[in-house]
Every structure is written in C-alpha cells, then in structure tokens.
Image: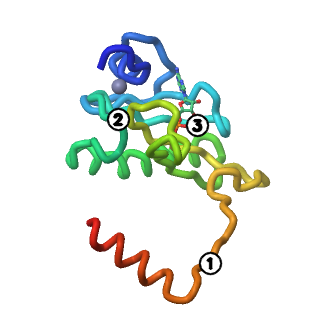
C-alpha cells in the first residue's frame, strides 16, 4: 500500500534493523522499544489490522512470535516476553499496518504491558455480555 511505513520497511524500501525474514514476514526492532530487544513482526502483505489478515498468514504469526520470544530469553537473558497485537485506535494501535509486538521482559521490571486494573461484573452482566459476543461470532 502506498505511503504505509510498515509496507516500506517490510518490503525493504526503508532500511531497518532486522533479525528475521521469510517470504511472508520481516521482523524488525521497534524504534521506541518498551524494553531492549523489542521486536515487531511485520507481514509483507498490507493488512490494516489482525481482522484483515488472511487465515494462512495469521496462523504463522504465533509460532514465529514464540520462536522470537525464546530467542530473546536465550540471547538477552529475558525471563519472559509479551506478545501484543493492538487492534484499533481505542486499543492503542498507532500504525495501521498489522504488526505483532514481541517484548522481552527482564527480572525486576514492573509489568508495564499486561497490567490492567481488575474489574468485576454486576449480577447477570457477564451472561448478557457473553450472549452478545456469541451472537456476533
Ligand atoms: P502500535 O501502538 O501497536 O500501533 O505500535 C506501533 C509501534 O511501531 C510503536 O511501538 C512504535 O514505536 C513503532 N514504530 C513506529 N514507527 C516505526 C518505525 N519507523 N520503525 C520501527 N518501529 C516503529
Ligand atoms: Zn502497509
């Protein structure tokens, strides 16, 4: 897609620090890392977000993310990693080319990524919300 920064990076029109590439993906360093070694998996074919990815491409992302996270643990001494896909502006997506963050986590760091306030449901609320989701599937 014209004027898409991640299309240009994924297809080599803009140089990047890359750790992996195959026919479907390029994996690059995030320019403003949440932690040292923060990676972005960029599909080479443009999709605005995860909902627009082909099932075939989507199915390849989780195994690749696990492989990259394992390498972060082995090579960088990370003790874990977060796999994050922000979808839509309300969820914090700022670049509208689907990408998967693989963020290494080091001992002693605050859990900055998955650290939401724990909520609750009123009586019957969970059941009606579940029903709405089931209807939409
Ligand atoms: P998101 O908020 O999930 O859309 O994440 C977008 C990510 O892309 C952010 O973490 C940015 O730091 C990163 N980013 C933006 N521009 C570039 C770029 N030119 N090269 C590498 N990473 C980038
Ligand atoms: Zn794109």
Locate residue 135: give its quadrant: bottom left
Q: CA distance from mark 2 to mark 1?
A: 32 Å
Residue 133, image x, y percentages: 35, 70
Q: Which residue is tagged 2?
A: 48
Residue 20, image x, y percentages: 40, 30
Q: CA distance from mark 3 to mark 2?
A: 21 Å
Residue 110, image x, y percentages: 76, 54
Q: Earlier in the sequence, mark 2 or mark 1?
A: 2
- Quadrant where ligand 1 appears: top right
Name the residue rendered at 26%, 29% in the picture. Answer: 45
Q: Give left or right: position of 100 versus 12.
A: right
Q: Earlier in the sequence, mark 3 or mark 2?
A: 3
Q: Which residue is tagged 1?
A: 120
As drawn, which residue projects farthest toward the right? 108
Q: Give the SS element for disc 2.
A: loop
Q: Give the SS element for disc 3.
A: loop
Name the residue rendered at 62%, 57% in the picture. Answer: 114
Tell whether circle 3 marks a residue whose Cβ is less than 8 angstroms from ligand 1: yes
Q: Are marks 2 and 1 in contact (CB under 8 Å)?
A: no
Q: Which residue is tagged 3?
A: 38
């Amino acid at each position: 897609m014209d004027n898409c920064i991640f299309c240009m990076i994924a297809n080599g029109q803009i140089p990047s620090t890359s750790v992996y590439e195959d026919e479907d993906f390029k994996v690059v360093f995030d320019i403003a890392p949440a932690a040292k070694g923060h990676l972005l998996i960029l599909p080479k074919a443009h999709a605005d977000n995860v909902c627009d990815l082909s099932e075939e491409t989507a199915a390849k992302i989780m195994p690749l993310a696990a492989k990259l996270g394992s390498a972060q643990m082995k090579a960088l001494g990370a003790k874990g990693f977060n796999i994050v896909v922000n979808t839509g502006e309300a969820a914090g997506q700022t670049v509208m080319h689907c990408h998967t963050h693989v963020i290494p986590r080091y001992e002693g760091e605050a859990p900055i990524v998955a650290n939401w306030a724990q909520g609750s449901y009123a009586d019957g609320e969970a059941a009606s919300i579940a029903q709405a989701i089931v209807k939409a599937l």
